[in-house]
Image (spheres, helix red, strand yellow):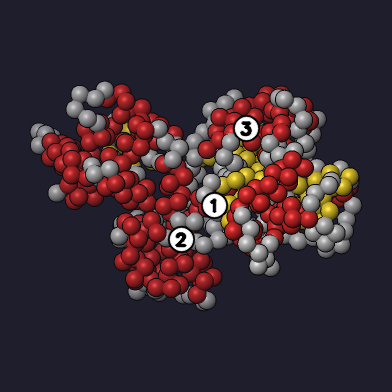
């Protein structure tokens, strides 16, 4: 049995499933379900959140027998009917196109000995049991916990792989004393339909929605309870999440909300906490091992390498390579974790050399991570797919900028001759809102920057659309024009040194 598979009596929503006794109950009443359908349901529920290939299900349920896919669909339909799947916003099984089926409801294992359904409340509020290695985040966890207690509604905002889920889980554990078992984690990643959000929240809370207005019914059912709902990965169903979150905030007094998203929900009551990269060594940093270990990005990297390759001691000779790697990865926890896996196999020097290549950077992978975090490319695909056409165009066309750039620079390089500058500015604002562009504002103007991982991805998209030559030429013309101004020294200060090197 894999470590992340569940066994024993399993609870989800109002249902209890016993694989040993082979029975599915709803509120203590056994439901009629055929043997094959029960086999399929048990296999899926024991692996919540995983996408199970259709052929894997067929091989498990009909071992050694040739069976058409249509038979599988018939039994899945029977399961959905028994669960009321899709009714009133409830959703348990989703079909991931081209991949297979996934059980998306929150599942709690009661353990070996059969326990009373009444014991459900002792388990259901538990946060996911995940190994958490959290470095450099104690301050933000404390700040978010305090803000959540005072304001009731906080959104952790940041790009994919920055560590929002890890922080949310840590905050959940930090406020356990206030909420006890009434803390509910709702993973929205696998949802493909915004109409499923209310049902997913209800399922996690162990309630069943029966009204034609699931949001209103959900609010009514939790109105008198004090609880914390953590909504994770909101960005792809953000309109539905925003509606539910706003209603819960406005219509209840003791429902607390912690959401993680790559863009804000933009509703009443929401308080933003932007999650920043881990502190990393700068170009001018002292490059001894002891000096580098003061940086959380380096600490995480060394810890993860040690976990994969045994005892590791950072030496002064290796320190410059580690500093370069952490800078290249922008202090992004996911990227650092993935790179650590490469070091265990290739060694530090070869890994750093490979990461200089943008395609290799995007290939960093983790086999057992959630799909959106399996590779850096998958993380960025997730964000790119949520962009408007205009935002996609601008993102790939600003890729030649290494380091900071201005709105005027983006307009010159990303815009077409005669194009309304307002459209470019709107796209830049959208990319900032969706955590794909970092921003810094000084007294004069705003400065923007793509993280190196995002920039590598944008360059790939630029090549895919055969725009490299024209966009790079515009970039070079913009830099040359800037340097030709009477105040050349001021112009050089405004342009990032790495951008100058690339254009030169």
The image quarter in which residue 13 lies:
top right
Q: Is residue 426 left or right of residue 417?
A: right
Question: Which is in the foreground here, disc 3 or disc 2?
Answer: 3
Q: Is residue 42 left or right of residue 29?
A: left
Q: Residue furthest toward the bottom?
A: 311
The image quarter in which residue 391 lies:
top left
Q: Residues within 10 Å of mark 2 (few under 14, many from 20)?
A: many
**Which badge, 3 or 2, comes first in the chain's sequence?**
3
Question: Which is in the foreground here, disc 1 or disc 2?
Answer: 1
Look at 79% across and 51% down and name the residue there: 34
Look at 77% across and 30% down and name the residue there: 210
- Secondary element at tag 1: loop
Residue highlighted by disc 2: 365
Q: CA distance from mark 3 to mark 2?
A: 32 Å
- Along the viewing direction, whichever of 499 and 475 lies nearer the viewer: 475
Look at 80% across and 59% down and name the residue there: 19
- Secondary element at tag 3: helix
- From what the image shows, is residue 395 above or below residue 8? above
**Cβ atoms under marks 1 and 2 closer than 8 Å:** no
Query: x, y percentage for residue 287?
Result: 35, 65
- Secondary element at tag 2: loop
- Along the viewing direction, whichever of 281 and 503 lies nearer the viewer: 503
Q: Residues within 10 Å of mark 3 (few under 14, many from 20)?
A: some
Look at 89% across and 46% down and name the residue there: 28
Residue highlighted by disc 3: 195
Q: Is residue 357 left or right of residue 292?
A: left
Residue highlighted by disc 1: 99
Instruction: Tally the marks.
Output: 3
Q: CA distance from mark 3 to mark 1?
A: 22 Å
**Which badge, 1 or 2, comes first in the chain's sequence?**
1
Q: Is residue 481 left or right of residue 157?
A: left
């Amino acid at each position: 049995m894999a470590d992340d598979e569940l066994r024993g009596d399993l609870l989800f929503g109002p249902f209890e499933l016993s694989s040993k006794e082979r029975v599915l109950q709803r509120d203590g009443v056994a439901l009629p379900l055929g043997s094959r359908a029960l086999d399929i349901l048990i296999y899926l529920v024991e692996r919540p959140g995983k996408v199970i290939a259709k052929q894997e299900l067929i091989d498990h349920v009909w071992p050694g027998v040739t069976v058409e896919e249509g038979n599988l669909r018939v039994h899945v339909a029977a399961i959905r009917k028994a669960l009321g799947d899709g009714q009133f916003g409830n959703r348990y099984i989703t079909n991931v196109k081209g991949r297979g089926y996934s059980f998306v409801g929150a599942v709690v294992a009661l353990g070996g000995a059969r326990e009373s359904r009444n014991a459900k409340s002792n388990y259901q509020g538990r946060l996911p049991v995940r190994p958490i290695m959290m470095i450099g985040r104690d301050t933000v966890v404390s700040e978010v916990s305090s803000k959540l207690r005072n304001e009731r509604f906080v959104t952790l905002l940041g790009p994919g792989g920055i560590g929002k889920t890890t922080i949310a889980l840590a905050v959940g554990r930090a406020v356990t004393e206030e909420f006890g078992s009434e803390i509910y984690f709702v993973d929205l990643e696998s949802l493909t339909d915004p109409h499923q959000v209310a049902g997913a929240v209800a399922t996690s809370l162990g309630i069943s929605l029966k009204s034609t207005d699931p949001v209103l019914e959900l609010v009514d059912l939790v109105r008198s309870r004090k609880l914390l709902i953590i909504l994770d990965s909101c960005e792809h169903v953000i309109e539905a999440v925003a509606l539910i979150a706003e209603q819960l905030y406005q219509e209840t007094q003791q429902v607390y909300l912690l959401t993680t998203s790559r863009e804000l929900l933009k509703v009443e009551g929401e308080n933003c906490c932007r999650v920043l990269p881990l502190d990393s060594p700068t170009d001018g940093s002292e490059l001894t091992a002891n000096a580098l270990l003061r940086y959380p990005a380096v600490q995480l990297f060394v810890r993860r390498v040690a976990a994969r390759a045994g005892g590791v001691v950072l030496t002064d000779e290796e320190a410059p390579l580690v500093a370069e790697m952490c800078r290249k990865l922008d202090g992004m926890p996911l990227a650092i974790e993935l790179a650590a896996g490469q070091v265990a196999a290739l060694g530090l020097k070869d890994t750093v050399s490979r990461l200089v290549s943008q395609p290799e950077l995007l290939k960093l992978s983790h086999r057992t991570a959630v799909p959106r975090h399996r590779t850096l490319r998958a993380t960025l695909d997730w964000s790119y797919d949520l962009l408007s056409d205009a935002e996609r165009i601008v993102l790939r066309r600003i890729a030649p900028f290494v380091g900071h750039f201005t709105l005027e620079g983006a307009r010159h390089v990303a815009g077409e001759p005669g194009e309304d500058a307002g459209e470019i500015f709107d796209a830049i604002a959208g990319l900032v809102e969706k955590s794909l562009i970092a921003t810094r504002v000084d007294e004069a103007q705003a400065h923007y920057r793509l993280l190196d991982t995002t920039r590598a991805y944008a360059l790939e998209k630029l090549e895919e659309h055969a725009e490299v030559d024209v966009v790079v030429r515009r970039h070079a013309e913009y830099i040359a024009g800037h340097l030709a101004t009477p105040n050349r020294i001021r112009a050089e200060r405004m342009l990032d040194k790495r951008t100058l090197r690339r254009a030169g």
